[in-house]
Amino acid sequence: MPQPIRLKDHEKDARLVRSRVIVGAIGILLLTGVLVARQYYLQVIQYDYHSTLAENNRIHVQPIPPTRGLIFDRNGVVIADNRPSFSLTVTRERADDWQQTLDVIVEVLQLTQEDRALFEKRMRQGRRPFEPVPILFELSEEQIARIAVNQFRLPGVEVVARLVRHYPLKEHFAHSVGYVGRINEQELKKLDPVNYSGTHHIGKTGVERFYEDQLHGKVGYEEVETNARGRVLRVLKRTDPIPGDDLVLSLDVNLQEAAEQALGGRRGAVVAIDPNTGEVLAMVSQPSFNPNLFVTGISFKDYGELRDSIDRPLFNRVLRGLYPPGSTIKPMVAVAGLDAGVVTPVSRVFDPGFYQLPNYDHKYRNWNRNGDGWVSLELAIARSNDTYFYDLAHKMGIDRLHSYMSRFGFGQRVSLDMFEESAGLMPSRDWKRARYRQAWYPGETLILGIGQGYMQSTPLQLAQATALVANRGKWIRPHLAKTIGGQPPVDPDPLPDIELRDERFWDYARVGMEQVVHGARGTARKVGDASVYRIAGKSGTAQVVAIKQGEKYDRNKIQERHRDHALFVGFAPAENPRIAVSVMVENGESGSGVAAPVVKQVMDAWLLDEEGQLKAEFRPQQPLSDNTSVSR
């Protein structure tokens, strides 16, 4: 009889269950041990690290930008200040999708796609984490209300009140004071990232840029506690920022306005300097522009109009305008000739209306085609006689002429705190050889002696050269800052004074310049007739287009913008100089007829009182003789 089949082995099943229980228990124990070990590692061994991370998520350090220093004129009139303005900021880390957020902003404020592209460009600029990025400035009340109503759709978006640079006098000081603008990518790489954290603007031009470090100040900080959404709960610690230093300029608002009125809307430049201190009293470049347009970002349309204007309002004619100085440099050339010993105060040259080099047929014309006959140095300056200075330049030679004129500041930057200034051009043999690979020709020396040819100078250089004649060669760099943070500016690289063999050489040049304005044959005698003080001046004309040999200048055949520039330089009172002025009127044609009256009006505004008399502080200590000649 067969054995019955067992349907279930209870003992085997029991052994299997026991083994599984044991394996499961061991697995649970192992996993528990791993979790305990991991927990121990995180909470004990790495306690400091993770507690720091948690603290950083809760506590943030926010920069506090300093208040930019104010800018005043010499009398305390505010030229640049800071005014509150509401800005729209976006914090990328707190916005769910900042691209979508920008779309909502454009929709809510009813802006254009150009604005959207500008917002995105600003958002992509490198910034510190959790630092709000301003994308829109000067919000209106309606825009602020629209943002408030739609705040639930705009995570990370805030309306913030900030101080924004403002220029209350607008275009009057645009070229001297300059303006601030948004920090761009290139500037961001060069700036101190710590000191400029929280700052979105920087000086772009003028003294705003030159004195950026002093005007900016030092950044402050505050430690704040935030919730999980990044909203500030409380301030834990605060370090106040150090505001920027105030800047007091040597410029005078009233004189600046008087100089602008004297130009009468014409294109040109005016520079007025105190020859005793180097302080720039007025600095005008016309036409000008409103610098407030650039502070928070100028529109493409407005910038295009300024950039493409034929009158070039953005161009600083005082510092960057390069013009042939013309006859305005003849007093300096006369001083050079006297000191070099090639002429004396009584040396005379016969002027038939032209000058010819020995063995050359070419005639170098005097502006007076009929000639002035026998001409002395004093009369040559008064009449602006070209023939005399052709002869003087020929006797000097290019090497000595270049050396002396360089000592007057031509061909180099002369200012102390105007970084935009051009060096101009004072040509020499070496310069021409390097530039054109040609030798220097004698005829080029002749025309250089009357301020034509390759020579180029700025109105500021002409004003400084005139101030050097006024103060008898004492070099003081012209500067715009009177005090910065209460301290006067210091020249780190002073230029040597012009020392002559005989100090009376300065007097001969001064008397010749006085005769220009007050002499019976002076080219600007009409200006001197109505003056209550003595003016030492010199007119000049700078050619824009060359005229062929033998031809005469005919204004009716020349386009208005191709006509000669009018220049005039001078200082007053002649016996006690307190102001030196340089004027350039583009396409003005006549230095004596157009530029000289501008100089006179600027001098009157500075030297005369309300009764039209010389101010007491400008009057000489002792009465002067009417005889203005210098003993020979």
Image: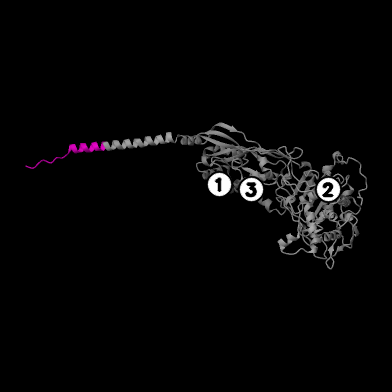
Mark 1 or mark 3: which comes first in sequence? Answer: 1
Q: Residue furthest left?
A: 1
Q: Nearer the viewer, residue 43 or 154?
A: 43
84 left or right of 50 in image = right
Rate crowding at label 1 as few (under 14), some (14 to 19) or many (20 or more) other CA atoms within 10 Å. few
Q: Quarter of the image holding residue 136?
A: top right
Chain part drawn in magenta: 1-21
Classify mark 1: helix, strand or loop. loop
Q: Are marks 3 and 2 in contact (CB under 8 Å)?
A: no
Q: Residue beneath label 3, please? A: 299
Which kind of residue does numbered mark 3 sit on? Ser
On the image, the x and y values in percent for residue 441 come to: 78, 64
Q: Residue beneath label 2, please? A: 472
Q: CA distance from mark 3 to mark 2?
A: 50 Å
Q: Nearer the viewer, residue 95 or 300?
A: 95
Q: CA distance from mark 1 to mark 3?
A: 19 Å
Q: Nearer the viewer, residue 623 or 9?
A: 623
Which kind of residue does numbered mark 1 sit on? Arg
Q: CA distance from mark 1 to mark 2?
A: 57 Å
Q: Nearer the viewer, residue 158 or 20?
A: 20
Answer whether residue 286 is magenta in the image: no
